[in-house]
Image (cartoon, rainbow, N blue to C red):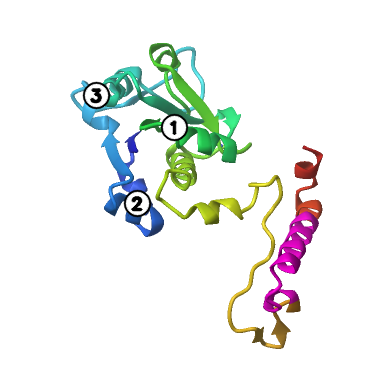
Amino acid sequence: MKIDILTLFPEMFSPLNSSILKRAVDNGILEFNVINIRDFSLDKHKKCDDYPFGGGAGMLMSVQPLYDAIKSVKDENSKIVFPSPRGKVFNQGKAKELSKYNHLIFVCGHYEGVDERIFQLFDMEEISIGDYVLTGGELPSMVIIDCLSRFVDGVISKESLESESFENGLLEYPQYTRPAEFMGLSVPDVLLSGNHQEVDKWRREQSLRKTANTRSDLLDE
Ligand code: ADE
């Protein structure tokens, strides 16, 4: 999968170059291209923002540099994502859906927003990562990219995806590793019993308990 990221702040994307995502890039499963929108500005000072018509607080991103930047990477199969608090809230289902595309383009807004005409010129899906406002689309893009990448074949094991939070509508059960005892705290006996049926039952109960305590809204669904 190829992911193009259009931003005024390319330096914010260095986290994509570590850990699991780096391994996926090294293995040729993912390709990230971080592109500076400023390189497309036709203004002699490479300006990419301006005051909003009608007045109001702050600056808006101008339409021209954005338009040319998107044009430079888009083809007929590209899916364009525009992170924004105006969008539907992101979840695992949306991550799985996005992981099926061969080419994604993330357009990062900054400042008070973008000239609305960019949404008339391109079909872009606005996606929010939660009901709060960040300084720009860079961190949300990274959140969405990190999450959807896990569903791209070969990035992590299928087994890891199956046993995690939300997969069965529940939060994940507690896990333990060696040592079996630390500072007087023991691992639950059932996990050391070797009885897989009992282990599965215990995990299911723990998942239900955790979900009921912290996210009872998931049980209602
Ligand atoms: N840009 C600013 N805030 C955001 C949010 N909550 N989600 C997605 N993009 C954003």
Q: Is residue 142 left or right of residue 42?
A: right
Check the picture and name the quadrant holding the C terminus: top right
Q: Position of residue 71 (x, y in %)?
A: 27, 20
Residue bearing the label numbered 2: 24
Residue bearing the label numbered 3: 72
Residue placed at 42% from the left, 18% from the top? 115
Indicate which disc residue 192 carries. none
Residue bearing the label numbered 1: 111
Q: For this rendering, which residue is in front, 51 or 64? A: 64
User: Bounds of the magenta span?
Assistant: 190-210
- Magenta segment includes 203: yes
Q: Position of residue 63 (x, y in %)?
A: 35, 18
For the residue marked with disc 2, what is the amino acid? Ala
The mark nearer the N terminus, 1 or 2, is: 2
Q: For this rendering, which residue is in front, 178 or 195? A: 195
For the residue marked with disc 1, what is the amino acid? Tyr
Label 3 crowd bin: few (<14), some (14–19), many (20+), radius 10 Å: few
Image quadrant assignment for residue 37: top left
Check the picture and name the quadrant holding the N terminus: top left
